[in-house]
Image: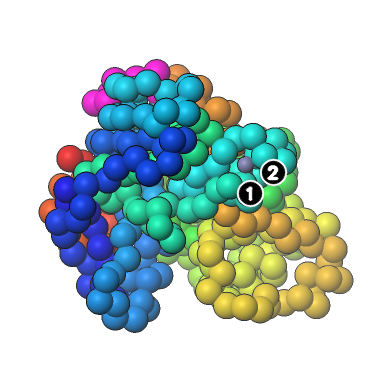
Amino acid sequence: MRATVMFGAGNVRIEAVPDARLIEPTDALVVVTRAAICGSDLWPYKTMEHSETGRRMGHEAVGVVETVGADVRTLKVGDVVVMPFAYSDGTCIFCHEGLHTSCIHGGFFGAGDVNGAQAEAVRVPQADGTLVVLPAGKDDALMPSLLTLSDVMATGHHAAVAAKVGPGRTAAVVGDGAVGLCGVIAARRLGAEQIILLGRHPNRIALAREFGATDVVSERGDKAVERVRELTDGFGVHSVLECVGLEQSMLTALSIARPGGAVGRVGVPQDETMPASRPAFYNNVTVSGGPAPARAYIEELLPDVLEGRIEPGRVFDRVVRLDEVPDGYRAMNEREAIKVLIGF
Ligand SMILES: [Zn+2]
């Protein structure tokens, strides 16, 4: 079969690889019908050292169950499914607490010996716990939005939950990438009355406004902090969704949280230390977040997608075939595309 392999920074290729197959009796084999390129795939795309064997990419997909292992109980051949970016058993102590990304039998697609999903097929470990059957045909018009439940919409929602967004509260979203845009959807869905997007790309700002952003701040650094304060009676916002992961974005996030506010961070931190720890301390700012337990959120978000109340699939502004994936990486890296959908 064909799969996406990254061999180093800027070097993504579609390669012929051994067919995906069942290994454990708890596995399912899924034929991928749609996958996506993630903003987090761009970090290795910018920095990865050359590797002879390469790294199998991709952790967002929907598809059709092709085969199931002997111990799989809840899935059958032909089911249309969405996979969260992490696999999980659904039964351990952390899964019961809704923190499936910390599953003691879990892990991440495209890491270790579990291959990525930007491929014709993917082996899904812990299939009963991981996969969610979708009440939709594989070519349903809602598929782009259903695909976002794999990661980007769940991650935007997680940022909003970690930032304690709620009715009547003010929120700011740092970052106008696909996760930030889904963060706007999530903040509105959870009832924020003011949603300030910090971003500078006109097409992304336009989409954010359609998703519910009430204000836009395109300045950077201290100027951005000043603008957010102006928009919030000088205090800052209750909830900040940090959707980038750089030192500067985290500094901005902590600086625009009002005293007693919360920062929900979902951008994978690119630094070991967190800036502004002293102001965060004196302002009693909660800092929370991490990899979204997408599996826990799919059931909550799915009805809103199916009934059209949210349309996160609109973050996809380019569709490529599998053999065009290398150009998809280039386009996202150069900010030519917000997010790339891979069709088959
Ligand atoms: Zn578990």
- Whether 116 is drawn above or below 333: the answer is above
Look at the numbered disc 1 and give the secondary structure of its residue: loop
Does the magenta run of residues contain 138?
yes
Q: Which mark is residue 104?
A: 1
Q: Quadrant of ligand 1?
A: top right
Residue at the spot x=85%, y=63% of the render?
284
Q: Which residue is mark 2?
A: 94
Any atom of ligand 1 within 8 Å of the CB at mark 1? yes
Question: Of residues 237 and 116, which is closer to you in this image?
Answer: 116
Residue at the spot x=31%, y=36% of the render?
30
The span picked out in magenta is 134-142
The answer to whether 215 appears left or right of 40 in the picture is right
Judge depth for marks 2 and 1 and give the one in front. 1
Place residue 165 in its image quadrant: top right
Any atom of ligand 1 within 8 Å of the CB at mark 2? yes
State whether residue 3 appears in this view: yes
Type of amino acid at the residue the image marks with label 1 = Ile
